[in-house]
Amino acid sequence: MPAPGTTAKCASTRQVKKLGKYDQLVEYTKPKTRPKWMTAGKYAALPETLVVREIHFRTKTKRGRVSEITLVTTLLNPEQYPAEELAALFLTRWGVETNFAHLKTTMRMDVLRSKTIEGVLREVQALALVYNLARLVMIAAVQTQRAAVERVSFLAALRWLALSTPEDQPLKLPLNPYRPNRHEPRVRKRRPKQYPLMKRPRKELRQRLGPTKRTA
């Protein structure tokens, strides 16, 4: 872990104020040369200096090793945003990907079936309504289970919502294990089938195949 008073690697940095043992305000200076991936307009719009906050902390990996992390943020107020809370929030960042997966995969929002703008909007509104209802079920469940709402199974809440009646009360829902600092590769688990994409209407593609031969 970097010693107090040092900064993360950057072209030009200067410590502005020490907020804690591993918590400090640092001024970053705009690089003299424009990076190749940045347009000239965006480079010109950048300020000459930028004050950010650097928080250094350690965490254990899945294999038990210690990983050193430097968190850079624009949340500069240490009283309003304590370093410990920001570090804990950073370790749960994979929850954002999990929530996206609930919408796209669990609720099958990745493929919308409507062909008009109005229809797509209605689909999105309906899915958002169901998603929020499932979240309310999760909140009601943790009030009796005394667990963090992030650990409640979203799929179990969705199934309970589909099978319950207005008189039913949320029962104990399955809890997922606590997995801080989780991150996963962005890869597919199964290979897609080796077929071309359907870029023309199904009726037209059937006509290309010719008449179907039947045998007695």
Image (cartoon, rainbow, N blue to C red):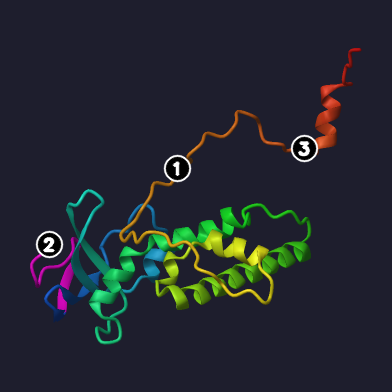
**Of the image marks 2 and 1, the number of the one nearer the N terminus:** 2
Residue beneath disc 2: 1
Please tell me whether mark 2 sits on a helix, a strand or a loop.
loop
Q: Amino acid at mark 2?
A: Met
Q: Amino acid at mark 1?
A: Val
Quadrant the N terminus occupies: bottom left
Q: Which residues are magenta?
A: 1-16
**Of the image marks 2 and 3, the number of the one nearer the N terminus:** 2
Q: Identify the residue at image location x=57%, y=53%.
A: 105
Quadrant of res 120 = bottom right
Q: Identify the residue at image location x=83%, y=29%.
A: 206
57 and 173: which one is in front? Answer: 173
User: Can the viewer see residue 126?
Assistant: yes
Quadrant of res 27 = bottom left
Task: Say whether residue 47 is magenta.
Answer: no
Please tell me whether mark 1 sits on a helix, a strand or a loop.
loop
Task: Say whether residue 10 is magenta.
Answer: yes
Q: Identify the residue at image location x=60%, y=67%.
A: 131
Label 2 packing within 10 angstroms: few (<14), some (14-19), many (20+)? few
Residue, far right: 216
Which circle marks residue 200 in the picture? 3
Q: Position of residue 71 (x, y in %)?
A: 25, 67
Q: Position of residue 76 (x, y in %)?
A: 27, 81
Judge depth for marks 1 and 3 and give the one in front: 1
Dominant secondary-structure state across the stretch colored magenta: loop
Asked if residue 27 lies left or right of residue 170, the reply is: left
Q: Position of residue 144 (x, y in %)?
A: 46, 76
Residue beneath disc 1: 187
24 and 87: which one is in front? Answer: 87
